[in-house]
């Protein structure tokens, strides 16, 4: 897709989605956006109950044993992202932006500030 001053962001409301399939969809869309074959995208959704474990996850920050979480219907999902332990579940709106940042837009603090403002206004 040709990128110009009038950029398009596709917003997809996904409903409730399990973490694994959503991660796969994000990776697929990232490849498409990076190659210019898809517009920037914002996925809005809720996750089925899941505890994600980032690269820096510490076991003492998971408050229940993994087996007990699974018995209660909470998936435990190791991820390649940074960070520690995060819970996602029904009623919690999650936004996953997949955006091609051009060279002059790579001010991460500005990007996060704009993203935060956009989510608040949404």
Image: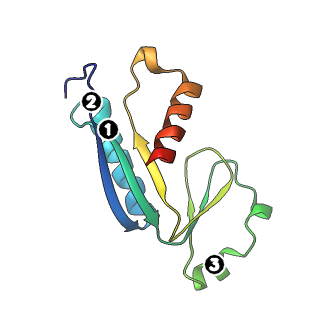
Name the foreground residue: 75 vs 3: 3
Q: Secondary structure at mark 3?
A: helix
Q: Dot 1: within a 10 Å radius of its alpha carbon, few (fewer than 14), some, or many (20 or more) residues? A: some
Q: Residue furthest front?
A: 121
* Residue at mark 2 to residue at mark 1: CA–CA distance: 6 Å
Kindly indicate whether the residue at mark 1 contacts the one at mark 2 (C-beta within 8 angstroms): yes
In the rendered structure, find residue 93 and report the number of the disc placed on it. none
Relative side of 98 to 4, left or right: right
Callout 2 crowding tier (Cα within 10 Å): few <14, some 14–19, many ≥20: few
Marks 1 and 3, Cα distance to the nearest angstrom? 33 Å
Q: Residue 2: where, in percent of width, then height? A: 20, 23
Give the residue at x 28% y 28%.
Answer: 7
Q: Quadrant of residue 30?
A: top left
- Report x, y in % for residue 109: 59, 27
Identify the residue under disc 1: 31
Q: Position of residue 80 (x, y in %)?
A: 55, 48
Q: Which residue is pictured at 40% across the width and 66% down the height?
A: 17
In primary-sequence order, the first of circles 2 and 3 is 2
User: Please, is residue 13 above or below residue 76 in the view?
Assistant: above
Where is residue 72, by image quadrant? bottom right
Q: Earlier in the sequence, mark 1 or mark 3?
A: 1
Q: Which residue is mark 3?
A: 69
How far apart marks 2 and 3 lie (CA) works out to 39 Å
Instruction: In the rendered structure, find residue 35 and report the number of the disc placed on it.
Output: 2
Count of numbered badges drawn on the protein: 3
Badge 3: few (under 14), some or many (20 or more) residues near its Cα, within 10 Å?
some
Residue at screen point 55% across, 25% down: 110
Q: Is residue 42 above or below residue 3?
A: below
Task: Judge left or right: residue 68 versus residue 101.
Answer: right
- Residue at the image position 26 percent from the left and 33 percent from the top: 8
Secondary structure of the residue carrying numbered label 1 = helix
């Amino acid at each position: 897709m040709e990128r110009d001053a009038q950029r398009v962001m596709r917003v997809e409301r996904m409903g409730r989605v399990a973490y694994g399939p959503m991660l796969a969809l994000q990776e697929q869309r990232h490849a498409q956006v990076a190659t210019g074959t898809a517009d920037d995208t914002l996925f809005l959704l809720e996750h089925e109950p899941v505890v994600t474990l980032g690269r820096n996850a510490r076991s003492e920050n998971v408050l229940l044993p993994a087996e007990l979480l699974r018995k209660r219907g909470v998936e435990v999902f190791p991820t390649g992202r940074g960070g520690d332990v995060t819970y996602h579940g029904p009623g919690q709106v999650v936004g996953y932006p997949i955006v091609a940042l051009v060279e002059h837009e790579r001010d991460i603090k500005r990007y996060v500030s704009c993203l935060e403002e956009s989510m608040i206004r949404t």
